[in-house]
């Protein structure tokens, strides 16, 4: 047998071996995707960090859709965002302090925390050399590689005492923007041939502004504050989102911080999770070309239905940026980003595109609802407008998911610390029912 064909032969054989009919899940009462019959998530843990509310429960226990609400450590997201917007200041560091410690910082604590983050933004020269040396086209994978490398550079990598976890968390939050900015600039240099610049992080500058400074130098105060707001909004989403749960599952084995965070990065990269922001902006560009009349509901519907039938765009059958595992009537972050996108579009002269995007949202929700024939309301999620905002800030799409990671590292580390410190912690180990019929072994010369 030719070795070259073996991979196809094995792949063909595994088609049969993977078969598990949907009804089997119902038959054994197995919660597909860790979801109950009504679509709500199976409760697998308790947390004091993020609270994601997408529905209420009626007295009879049925699910009652409601507008989405999000709380960080007991504070409603909107109450945290409003003063930052009103006072035209940066807020990501304050939110990071809150999520890590459970307490809002006073002025002195905040200044000290900002200083500590700033002190930790610079990368070890070996990490810089490796980013340059190995290059790569996917910034999420480079980020993951650099995180794993931090294990080697850490004098105390395996210690899971609370003090050490906090030190590692602060270092990771501080270094993510630097890694992403350097990795993108090196990618641009090697793939697009542009000149290479590596700017060291500046003193007395926060995460959002420092990131823009290291990435491209030319940015406005509004750009930096908009990015800061996006970082706040994406910092945390409870214990059940796939990447945070991945961090909690791996942390429960008491593995080291870097292994656990690298696993979270891998999860966030997926197009059904954080990677949807890149899929979404590409979908928007695709629709801008494919739909000739941007105000025609009929033409938009026809095209979206072709997407649902796997005929066009990436042929996955998905309309990206629509739908959520928890939210039903609205995702509060998408509501905020839609408002922000409208304001920016006005300023940047892109209102026609914004109106088109809004129509895609409206029709997308209707088309998916009709297509999947479910009673559960569906809404646009965080990723629907974030890419359009990044684009208006002049940011390249290769870094959209990495920016999500720059924010979510705060939630990941907060959850890791919680996972390793609550009373009664236990390794996470659910069960799989085996549905394979038993077979009798056949000796090699008889097959
Ligand atoms: C930051 C974030 O992670 S936000 C999410 C970003 N991801 C996306 O935008 C990708 C598009 N959306 C989706 O794929 C889904 O809505 C998810 C992954 C976000 C949530 O999935 P679920 O929790 O399974 O959603 P839900 O229970 O409401 O819907 C289930 C069914 O509707 C379908 N559905 C849900 N959203 C969509 C969509 N946008 N397009 C097409 N079909 C969809 C699912 O494929 C599923 O079908 P199935 O039962 O035949 O397998
Ligand atoms: O909660 C989820 O499943 C996904 C999500 O919106 C997030 O992680 O921000």
Image (cartoon, rainbow, N blue to C red):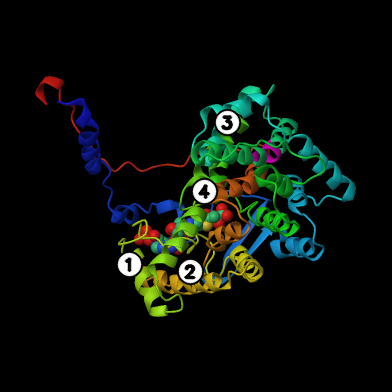
The local secondary structure at tag 2 comes to loop
Q: Secondary structure at mark 3?
A: helix
> Mark number for residue 378?
2
Disc 2 C-beta below 8 A from ligand 1: yes
- Cβ atoms under marks 2 and 3 closer than 8 Å: no
Is 321 displayed left or right of 49 in the figure?
A: left
In the picture provided, is 223 more to the left or to the right than 276? right
Quickly name the residue at label 4.
Answer: 242
Task: Find residue 306 and name its label.
Answer: 1
> SS class of the residue under badge 1?
helix
**Quarter that holds the C terminus:** top left
Magenta residues span 172-176
Q: Earlier in the sequence, mark 3 or mark 4?
A: 3
- The residue singled out by tag 3 in the image is 131
Q: Residue furthest left?
A: 446
Q: Crowdedness of circle 1 by 10 Å Cα count: few (<14), some, many (20+)?
A: some
Q: Nearer the viewer, residue 276 or 164?
A: 276
Badge 2 vs badge 1, beta-carbon distance below 8 Å: no
């Amino acid at each position: 047998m030719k070795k070259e064909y073996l991979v196809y032969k094995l792949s063909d054989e595994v088609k049969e071996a993977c078969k598990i009919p949907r009804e089997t899940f119902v038959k054994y009462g197995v919660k597909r995707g860790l979801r109950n019959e009504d679509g709500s998530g199976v409760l697998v843990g308790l947390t004091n960090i993020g609270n994601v509310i997408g529905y209420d429960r009626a007295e009879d226990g049925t699910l009652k859709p409601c507008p989405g609400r999000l709380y960080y450590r007991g504070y409603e997201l909107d109450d945290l965002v409003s003063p930052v917007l009103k006072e035209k200041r940066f807020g990501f560091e304050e939110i990071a302090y809150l999520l890590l410690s459970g307490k809002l910082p006073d002025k002195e604590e905040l200044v000290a925390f900002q200083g500590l983050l700033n002190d930790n933004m610079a990368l070890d020269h070996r990490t810089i050399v490796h980013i340059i040396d190995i290059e790569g086209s996917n910034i999420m994978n480079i980020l993951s590689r650099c995180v794993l490398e931090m294990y080697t550079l850490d004098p105390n990598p395996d210690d899971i005492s609370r003090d050490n976890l906090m030190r590692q968390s602060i270092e990771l939050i501080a270094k993510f923007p630097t890694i992403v900015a350097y990795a993108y600039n090196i990618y641009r240099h090697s793939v697009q041939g542009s000149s290479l610049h590596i700017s060291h992080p500046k003193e007395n500058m926060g995460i959002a502004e420092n990131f823009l400074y290291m990435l491209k130098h030319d940015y406005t105060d509004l750009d930096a504050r908009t990015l800061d707001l996006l970082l706040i909004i994406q910092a945390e989403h409870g214990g059940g989102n796939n990447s945070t749960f991945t961090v909690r599952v791996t942390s429960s084995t008491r593995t080291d911080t870097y292994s656990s965070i690298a696993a979270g990065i891998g999860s966030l990269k997926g197009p059904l999770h954080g990677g949807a922001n890149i899929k979404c902006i590409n979908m928007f560009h695709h629709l801008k070309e494919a739909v000739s009349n941007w105000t025609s509901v009929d033409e938009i519907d026809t095209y979206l239905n072709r997407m649902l039938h796997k005929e066009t765009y990436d042929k996955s059958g998905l309309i990206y940026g629509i739908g959520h595992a928890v939210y039903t009537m609205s995702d509060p972050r998408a509501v905020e980003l839609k408002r922000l996108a409208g304001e920016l579009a006005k300023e940047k002269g892109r209102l026609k595109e914004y109106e088109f995007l809004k129509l895609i949202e409206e029709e997308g929700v209707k088309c998916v609802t009709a297509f999947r024939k479910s009673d559960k309301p569906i809404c646009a999620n965080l990723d629907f407008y974030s890419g359009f905002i990044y684009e208006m800030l002049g940011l390249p799409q290769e870094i959209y998911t990495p920016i999500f990671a720059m924010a979510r590292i705060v939630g990941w580390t907060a959850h890791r610390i919680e996972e390793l410190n609550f009373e009664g912690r236990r390794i996470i180990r659910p069960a799989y029912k085996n549905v394979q019929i038993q077979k009798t072994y056949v000796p090699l010369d008889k097959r």
